[in-house]
Amino acid sequence: MTTAAADAQKRTFIEHLARQMTIPKFIFAIAMFLFWAMIIFPFFWMVSSSFKTGAEIAARQPVFIPSELRTEAYRELVEPSASYVEYAWNHVWYRILGGYAVQFDSGQERFQDFGINIINSFVVAVPTALIAVILSMMGAYAIARLNFKGKDFMLNSVLMIYLFPGILLIIPLFAMLSQISQWLGFEVQDNLAILIFTYLAQTLPVALYMLANYFRTIPDEIEQAAMIDGCTRVQVIWKITMPLAVPALVSVAVYTFMIAWNEFLYALVFLNDRALFTMPIKINAIFNDPSPRMAVVMAASTIMSLPVMLLFLALERYLAEGLSAGGVKG
């Protein structure tokens, strides 16, 4: 193709684009660009900052792309052999500011043992998601299919829990669990099982509401036909209802997993042992370190964000169907 022909084709494309691009379409394109930029840029900045030096992060002019991909922040999080020497100016500045209680020794270990925090988050989030799905499925099926007195009132009452913020419920919940622990002889503090229970108190109401509305969209005639063929109620739930409700079950599982994975307030109150910290608490501890390193904070935040992002990408089609059907009252 000659240069003249290529220029003519380029002009033809531009003219065609100009004819198609009306003012409303142009405004819509600009709005969509700004919308996606606001969503993507914070994540880009977080990942980029995890590879920067302290000088690049603190620079007056923003550094969007690091000069090189440094993995020291990730090594500090997960590599036991990574030892980082404290610079003398840290000790000097803390003495100048009166922080005599803080001492830095040359060759101090900077290994954060972030792997144990990742495991703790999985230990809390996965059982929360599984238990929430099982309990909400049984409760939602009873609400959607069985007739009993006060059914609608019970469902609306359960959902009313979401009118109260978590910080308002944490004190009575902690006091109740403390009383129960004295009777049954278990510890409330530094108990991951107790933390799972508190997360269920937050996630079960909306999970129950979502599944109840989804079960109402499944035709009752299918289950009645199976019961006529000899299936029991449990067999109907296992063989008919559950396969049809997979999108809603996946949506509830991902939702509850995400809540437990990212939760900070309850974990901060119920966990004191550093060996039991979940990732949000550990990231907060790194950030509040006397000599905070923002690259390490950003690296930990990047690691924490990946599982939820992968879940959303892998289960996108189930989430779209489950959330849209569960949001319509049947």
Image: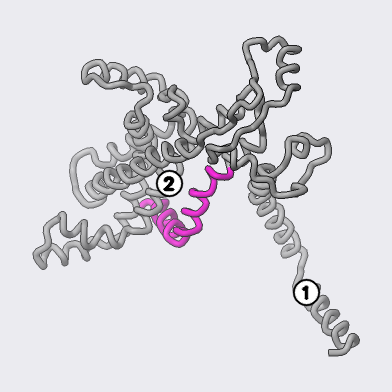
**x, y (%) of residue 304?**
53, 43
- Is 318 colored magenta in this rendering? yes
- Is 78 colored magenta in this rendering? no
Which amino acid lies under the numbered mark 2 shown in the image of this protein? Tyr
- Tell me which corner region of the image, top left, top right, bottom left or bottom right, holds residue 318: bottom left
Instruction: Return the residue nearer the eye: 51 or 63.
Output: 51
Q: Number of numbered discs present?
A: 2
Identified at 79% across, 41% down, the residue is 62
Which amino acid lies under the numbered mark 1 shown in the image of this protein? Leu
**x, y (%) of residue 329?**
37, 51
Query: Eyeballing the image, is 81 above or below 212?
Result: above
Q: Circle 2 sits on which residue?
A: 255
Identified at 68% across, 57% down, the residue is 32
Q: CA distance from mark 2 to mark 1?
A: 41 Å
What label sits on residue 80 in the rendered view? none
Q: Circle 1 sits on which residue?
A: 17
The colouring scheme, among rainbow, by chain, secondary structure or one colour, is one colour
Instruction: Return the residue nearer the eye: 89 or 272.
Output: 89
**x, y (%) of residue 278?**
46, 34
Residue 42 visible to an observer of this rendering? no
Lateral position of residue 17 relative to residue 208, left or right: right
Identified at 54% across, 40% down, the residue is 79
Residue 33 visible to an observer of this rendering? yes
